Image (spheres, rainbow, N blue to C red):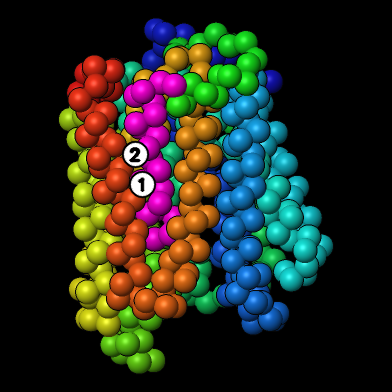
Amino acid sequence: MAPRDVGAGESVAAKRFAIALLLLSEIAAMATWFATTASVGAIRTQWSLSPFQEALLTNSVQAGFVAGTLVSALLGLADRFDLRGLFCGSAATAGFANLLMLAFEPTSAGVPLLRFVTGACMAGVYPVGMKIAATWAVGDLGLLIGLLVGALTLGSALPHLVAAFGQLDWHLPVLGAALGAFLAAVLVRFVRLGPATTEVPPLSLKNALEAWRNRGVRLANLGYLGHMWELYAMWAWIGAFMTASFREQYGDAPPFPPELAAFCIVAAGAFGAMLGGWAADRFGRTLVTGASMLASGCCAVGIGFLFGGPAWAVLSVGVLWGVAVIADSAQFSAAVSELSDRRLVGTMLTIQTCIGFLLTLVSIQLIAFAGTYLGWRFAFALLAVGPFFGLVSMLRLRRLPEAKRLAGGRR
């Protein structure tokens, strides 16, 4: 049985406990997203994977998430159903999908199919978790969602750490992710909702169009698209970039494993997400997102000029990029939450993540080709287009009267 929801006058302690439990549930459930990423090196030692098969292990999850969020948005699942029940059912289904993967060889067609199912289930975990956090927001929405994004960032970084210290049997990360999902399904049932809940809207496919009709939400989503063009392509290929750069400078004797460097770069984003949330609540959403995208775009261009240079120099710029590239992420979701019809926040967040992750399928593949044909010195520069486009969108949003609803009037 779910715990009683919290009234407006209840304590800060109840809020902290609920958010902590939500974060733990989110981390445990999202482990299924990165399960095969952590084990792909071990898979290579036993099976011959074509580049297409290897990419499919990652892209099938992304594609499943896009499909899941599209269905969820059209049906308004995050606004019309119990949030904890939706999260619980999605996490449990993802856990079963990962358990079934253990019955197949990695080269089987069943694995990407189950990875697709896992991604679709995450549509009931990630945006739903953001809406649960939003029910607790009292002038700190940016920070609360930033904490969730920070948890996602740590999950993205862990496969690099696994690779740095030796490969595990590929079954172990998948089994661990399945158990984590089942744990999340149980824990989320004990997460209490905050006082900022809303009435259930009527079912209407037209509700999804509000993401375009609402001018403020539209510009926030365009900013998010610029951000997502860069983010997942950077996360996907920073390990390959660091490996190639270290080999260029040090041959087979780098000062430390390039996988460890990649872990530090991606994991630094957890700090960036929390710092960005704290700053945006105090100084303004468009200000923080604009500054973050300007910094990350410059890093995307600049890091290529350090390719093959000293490890400390490449890593320093990489860590700065890791912080900047994610510092703005939660603020696009916070902005959409503040600018939307309160009854449709779940649907608007789901649409935002849907279109963002759909775009990542393009940028991830683009960098794969660019690394091959342009070389790593120039490949990442193509990602700078995204944050500079997003910067323009957020500057336009800043000038709208609706922007006064952002961060308590701090724009």
Q: Position of residue 40 (x, y in %)?
A: 60, 70
Quadrant hosting residue 296: bottom left
- Write down the region rendered in magenta: 213-234
| Tag count | 2
What residue is drawn where x is 59% and y is 29%?
73
Q: Amino acid at mark 1?
A: His
**What residue did someone put label 2 on?**
223
Amino acid type of the residue tagged 2 in the rendering: Gly
Residue 331 point in image, percent of width and height: 33, 35
Nearer to me, 143 or 198: 198
Q: Label 2's element? A: helix
Nearer the observer, 227 or 48 = 227
Q: Are marks 2 and 1 in contact (CB under 8 Å)?
A: yes
On residue 227, the disc is 1
Q: Is residue 151 left or right of residue 269?
A: right
> The N terminus is located in which quarter?
top right
| 237 up-or-down from 411: above or below | below
Residue 207: mark in rendering: none
* Horizontal side, residue 152 vs residue 403: left or right: right
